Amino acid sequence: MSTRPFSPINQEHADALAALVGPRNVSTEAEKLAAYSRDEVPASAWDRPYTAEALVFAESTEDVSKILAYANAHRIAVTPRGAGTGLSGGAVPACGGIVLSLEKMNRILELDEENLTVTVEPGVVTSEITKLASAHKLLYAGDPCSGDASFIGGNVAENAGGNKVIKYGATGAQVLGLEAVLADGRIVRFGGKRRKDVTGYDFVHLLVGSEGTLAVVTEVTLKLLPMPEHNVDLLAAFSDLESAIAFVPKIVTQTRILPASIEYIDHQALSLAQRYLNCTLPAGDAGAHLIIQLEGNDPEILADEYERVGDLCLEHGAFEVFVADNRTAKDKLWKARKSIPEAISTFYSHYLKEDVVVPVSKIPALLEAVKDLCTRYPVTFVSFGHAGDGNIHLSLLSGEDTTDWKTPLHEAQEALYRIVESMGGTLSGEHGIGLKRRDLVGFFLDETQQELIRRVKTAFDPNGILNPFKIVPWTTSS
């Protein structure tokens, strides 16, 4: 890969940064640099080590402004970083330079009950927003499975989806306003507490999902909703994955009920979760599970709805439907669902975690095609994810005793992408492109679209210092 001539960080730069934000906020210690130069993508995925030359913590918007202004003036690459829970290499410093940690910007600034908004800094853990809203009988509907660990800034950078997209939309649907710092240090505000705004371009939602390549978000205003008083989770056990997935569209079309969540777990994922948690789930040997969450304010109406959905499950192939209507039962289901990525990382060394999206009606055909793909390449797969919105978390796995494990995995990955593209799908629903998928984005974005991305990047960041060489392929002349 060609790289722009970014300036390496020397002692003079380190001292200047320390003078700007304080010595406690600048480190060049090798151990810290290694820890902050990675996310959840395993190091074995990279062609070489990628390590920052300086770790800089910001404590305020003004700190971010000073850091970026200095970096821009001296042509130093800057990689913004949240909690490091990403799965695309978005927080991996592709060109060395500065890793800019936002973890100290962790204040909840305001809960506005009149306008139903909450304003926070980017280093706030997502679940803390959910808890605060809930304490006021309000709902923050952004619900990524990593919410107990991820920062809201990272959610915004990746436009994280999660469990409730089918009803409420992804993170971007919750974002009303942003404060951000441009590459040259200028502080700008886009949007606000208002619910409608067509004055100029929609810069709020351009920055959401831009993976830290356009600006550094330093404040987020999020939409809140009235909290439904009651919710119930149904666990529907099917003998095979095909029946479970084929049933998903019928939940809405035949009952006219829109669940908050429709998640699926295949047999392999179910087995891994139980092994990882050392627990047994209801119908733990099923071919597939669906988790269907319903919510409402009237307990009698809700009971009628979940009975209708449960009966429909049984009519369409489920052999058992369990009702989780208390905290313990709900937590057990969701803990198993959320543990699957960690279980895969624990029990397998060689894998590719994919995040593809297809139209919901195409999910059965996609999974059938993946089964066929695994007969042509020496790989297996585990799948789970957001059946209600077509976002499939599909991990391709290679045997532990395989010497050349990268070649079959990457060949199978490219075959998967061709299948997904042929079905009107796309590369990523919520994990992002980052460094991991950058060179594969051409399967889904033609050169005109890629060039538009480069032009937008250049408009925001003429020197290309912000999270460089991410999302689309770049050259020194780009």
Image (cartoon, grey):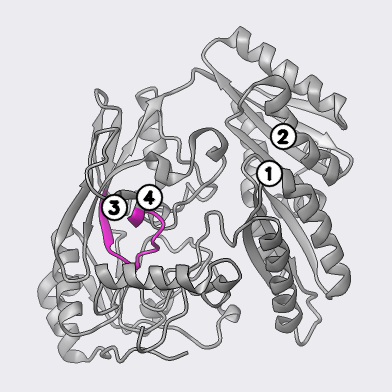
Q: Earlier in the sequence, mark 2 or mark 3?
A: 3
Q: Residue at x 42, y 69 (%)?
A: 91
Using a 10 Å C-alpha cutoff, classify the residue at mark 3 as few (fewer than 14 neighbours), some (14 to 19) or many (20 or more). few
Q: Given the image, on which type of amino acid does mark 1 rest?
A: Val
How far apart marks 2 and 3 lie (CA) works out to 34 Å
Q: Magenta segment, which residues?
A: 206-219
242 and 47: which one is in front?
A: 242
Q: Earlier in the sequence, mark 3 or mark 4?
A: 4
Front label number (4 vs 2): 2
Q: Is residue 270 left or right of residue 300?
A: right
How far apart marks 1 and 2 lie (CA) works out to 7 Å
Q: Which residue is mark 4?
A: 152
Q: Given the image, on which type of amino acid does mark 4 rest?
A: Ile
How far apart marks 1 and 3 lie (CA) works out to 29 Å
Q: Is residue 347 visible?
A: no
279 and 168: which one is in front?
A: 168
Q: Given the image, on which type of amino acid does mark 3 rest?
A: Phe
Residue 203: numbered disc:
3
Where's residue 415, x and y in %? 74, 71
- Asked if labels 2 and 1 touch by Cβ distance under 8 angstroms, the answer is yes
Where's residue 461, x and y in %? 26, 72
Q: Which residue is mark 2?
A: 249
Q: Is residue 142 left or right of residue 59?
A: right
Q: Which residue is mark 1?
A: 360
How far apart marks 3 and 4 lie (CA) works out to 18 Å
Q: Is residue 110 magenta?
A: no
- Which quarter of the picture shows residue 293? top right
- Which quarter of the picture shows residue 316? top right
Q: Is residue 154 left or right of residue 357?
A: left
